[in-house]
Amino acid sequence: MALKKGDIIDEHKRHPDSCGLVLKVMNGGEGFEKILCCGHELTIEDVVSSFNQGRGRRKGRLLSGMTIDEKKVATHSCGLRLMIMGGGEGFQEVICCGNSIEAGAMQDLQFGQMRSEDPSPGTTPNTSHEGTA
Protein backbone atom coordinates (compact mmCIF):
# COMPACT_ATOMS: atom_id res chain seq x y z
CA MET A 1 0.00 0.00 0.00
CA ALA A 2 1.35 3.45 -0.94
CA LEU A 3 1.30 6.72 0.93
CA LYS A 4 -0.97 9.49 -0.29
CA LYS A 5 -1.03 13.26 0.07
CA GLY A 6 -2.11 14.28 3.58
CA ASP A 7 -0.98 11.08 5.36
CA ILE A 8 0.79 11.67 8.67
CA ILE A 9 3.52 9.28 9.86
CA ASP A 10 4.14 9.33 13.63
CA GLU A 11 7.06 7.44 15.16
CA HIS A 12 5.37 7.51 18.59
CA LYS A 13 2.54 5.27 17.33
CA ARG A 14 4.65 2.10 17.67
CA HIS A 15 7.78 3.46 19.41
CA PRO A 16 6.83 5.75 22.33
CA ASP A 17 10.45 5.83 23.61
CA SER A 18 11.78 7.35 20.37
CA CYS A 19 12.49 10.97 19.31
CA GLY A 20 8.91 11.20 18.01
CA LEU A 21 9.51 12.04 14.36
CA VAL A 22 6.30 13.22 12.66
CA LEU A 23 6.12 13.70 8.88
CA LYS A 24 3.29 14.78 6.61
CA VAL A 25 3.11 13.63 2.98
CA MET A 26 2.96 16.67 0.71
CA ASN A 27 3.22 14.86 -2.64
CA GLY A 28 3.94 11.46 -4.22
CA GLY A 29 4.40 8.32 -2.15
CA GLU A 30 3.53 5.51 -4.57
CA GLY A 31 6.99 3.92 -4.15
CA PHE A 32 7.32 4.46 -0.37
CA GLU A 33 9.12 1.65 1.46
CA LYS A 34 10.26 2.86 4.92
CA ILE A 35 11.79 5.60 7.05
CA LEU A 36 14.70 4.87 9.38
CA CYS A 37 14.78 6.89 12.59
CA CYS A 38 16.26 6.04 16.02
CA GLY A 39 17.02 2.55 14.72
CA HIS A 40 13.31 1.92 14.00
CA GLU A 41 11.67 1.25 10.64
CA LEU A 42 8.59 3.41 10.07
CA THR A 43 6.18 1.99 7.50
CA ILE A 44 2.55 2.30 6.43
CA GLU A 45 1.66 0.87 9.88
CA ASP A 46 2.81 4.17 11.43
CA VAL A 47 0.25 6.34 9.59
CA VAL A 48 -2.08 8.16 12.02
CA SER A 49 -5.28 10.07 11.39
CA SER A 50 -4.18 13.29 13.15
CA PHE A 51 -1.08 14.90 14.61
CA ASN A 52 -0.90 14.61 18.39
CA GLN A 53 1.47 17.26 19.75
CA GLY A 54 2.21 15.23 22.85
CA ARG A 55 5.31 15.72 24.92
CA GLY A 56 8.56 13.88 24.40
CA ARG A 57 9.36 14.88 20.82
CA ARG A 58 13.07 15.63 20.55
CA LYS A 59 14.24 17.91 17.76
CA GLY A 60 17.57 17.41 16.07
CA ARG A 61 18.89 18.98 12.89
CA LEU A 62 15.41 18.62 11.38
CA LEU A 63 13.32 21.71 12.01
CA SER A 64 9.56 21.92 11.78
CA GLY A 65 8.56 23.05 8.31
CA MET A 66 11.57 21.58 6.50
CA THR A 67 10.81 19.36 3.53
CA ILE A 68 12.47 16.18 2.33
CA ASP A 69 12.19 15.98 -1.45
CA GLU A 70 12.88 12.75 -3.35
CA LYS A 71 13.16 14.66 -6.65
CA LYS A 72 16.45 16.21 -5.42
CA VAL A 73 17.97 12.71 -5.27
CA ALA A 74 16.21 10.89 -8.12
CA THR A 75 14.42 12.82 -10.85
CA HIS A 76 12.69 9.71 -12.22
CA SER A 77 10.82 8.69 -9.07
CA CYS A 78 7.34 8.97 -7.56
CA GLY A 79 8.25 12.43 -6.23
CA LEU A 80 7.73 11.79 -2.52
CA ARG A 81 7.87 15.05 -0.59
CA LEU A 82 7.57 15.04 3.20
CA MET A 83 7.27 17.94 5.64
CA ILE A 84 8.74 17.69 9.14
CA MET A 85 6.07 18.37 11.76
CA GLY A 86 7.99 17.42 14.91
CA GLY A 87 10.82 15.41 16.45
CA GLY A 88 13.63 14.16 14.24
CA GLU A 89 16.65 13.85 16.51
CA GLY A 90 17.35 10.28 15.36
CA PHE A 91 16.48 10.69 11.66
CA GLN A 92 18.61 8.54 9.35
CA GLU A 93 16.97 8.17 5.93
CA VAL A 94 13.84 7.61 3.85
CA ILE A 95 13.72 4.71 1.38
CA CYS A 96 11.36 5.28 -1.54
CA CYS A 97 11.39 3.79 -5.07
CA GLY A 98 14.67 2.10 -4.11
CA ASN A 99 16.30 5.50 -3.46
CA SER A 100 17.93 6.52 -0.18
CA ILE A 101 16.94 10.04 0.79
CA GLU A 102 19.12 11.58 3.49
CA ALA A 103 19.88 15.08 4.79
CA GLY A 104 21.11 16.25 1.36
CA ALA A 105 17.55 16.23 0.02
CA MET A 106 16.25 18.66 2.61
CA GLN A 107 14.99 22.11 1.84
CA ASP A 108 14.59 24.54 4.67
CA LEU A 109 12.90 27.89 4.76
CA GLN A 110 15.65 30.43 5.38
CA PHE A 111 13.93 33.78 5.51
CA GLY A 112 15.99 36.92 5.13
CA GLN A 113 18.85 35.30 3.25
CA MET A 114 19.68 35.78 -0.42
CA ARG A 115 19.70 32.68 -2.61
CA SER A 116 22.88 33.76 -4.36
CA GLU A 117 25.43 36.52 -4.11
CA ASP A 118 24.58 39.98 -5.39
CA PRO A 119 26.35 41.04 -8.58
CA SER A 120 29.29 43.32 -8.04
CA PRO A 121 28.33 47.03 -7.90
CA GLY A 122 30.51 47.87 -10.93
CA THR A 123 28.41 45.83 -13.37
CA THR A 124 25.34 47.17 -15.09
CA PRO A 125 22.39 45.24 -16.43
CA ASN A 126 22.46 44.30 -20.10
CA THR A 127 20.09 46.99 -21.43
CA SER A 128 20.34 49.53 -24.23
CA HIS A 129 19.04 52.38 -22.06
CA GLU A 130 21.51 54.94 -20.80
CA GLY A 131 21.26 58.22 -18.95
CA THR A 132 19.35 59.38 -15.93
CA ALA A 133 15.66 59.34 -15.28
Image: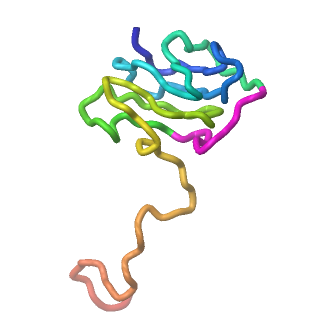
Say if 30 sits above or below 26 in the image. Answer: above
Does residue 17 appear to the left or right of 1 in the view shown?
right
Query: In which quarter of the view is residue 126 placed?
Result: bottom left
Among all residues in the image, which is located at the extreme bottom?
131
Say if 106 sits above or below 19 in the image. Answer: below
Seen at 66% across and 30% down, the residue is 19
Does residue 75 appear to the left or right of 44 in the view shown?
left
**Which one is nearer the viewer's eye here, 35 or 50?**
35
The chief SS type of the magenta part is loop
Is 9 in the magenta? no
**Which one is nearer the viewer's eye here, 18 or 2?**
18
Task: Provide residue 35's location: percent of width, then percent of height.
Answer: 48, 24
Query: In which quarter of the view is residue 133 placed?
Result: bottom left
Say if 70 sits above or below 111 in the image. Answer: above
**Which one is nearer the viewer's eye here, 88 or 78?**
88
Seen at 33% across and 30% down, the residue is 99
Magenta segment range? 55-66
Task: Provide residue 28's location: percent of width, then percent of height.
Answer: 38, 24
Task: Provide residue 91's location: percent of width, then percent of height.
Answer: 55, 34
**Which one is nearer the viewer's eye here, 72 or 93?**
93
Among all residues in the image, which is located at the extreme right?
55
Query: In which quarter of the view is residue 65 placed?
Result: top right
**If the image is split into quadrants, where does the N terminus sit?**
top left
Among all residues in the image, which is located at the extreme front?
39
Seen at 36% across and 90% down, the residue is 132
Does residue 63 appear to the left or right of 52 in the view shown?
left
Task: Provide residue 15's location: percent of width, then percent of height.
Answer: 65, 17
Say if 75 sits above or below 47 in the image. Answer: below
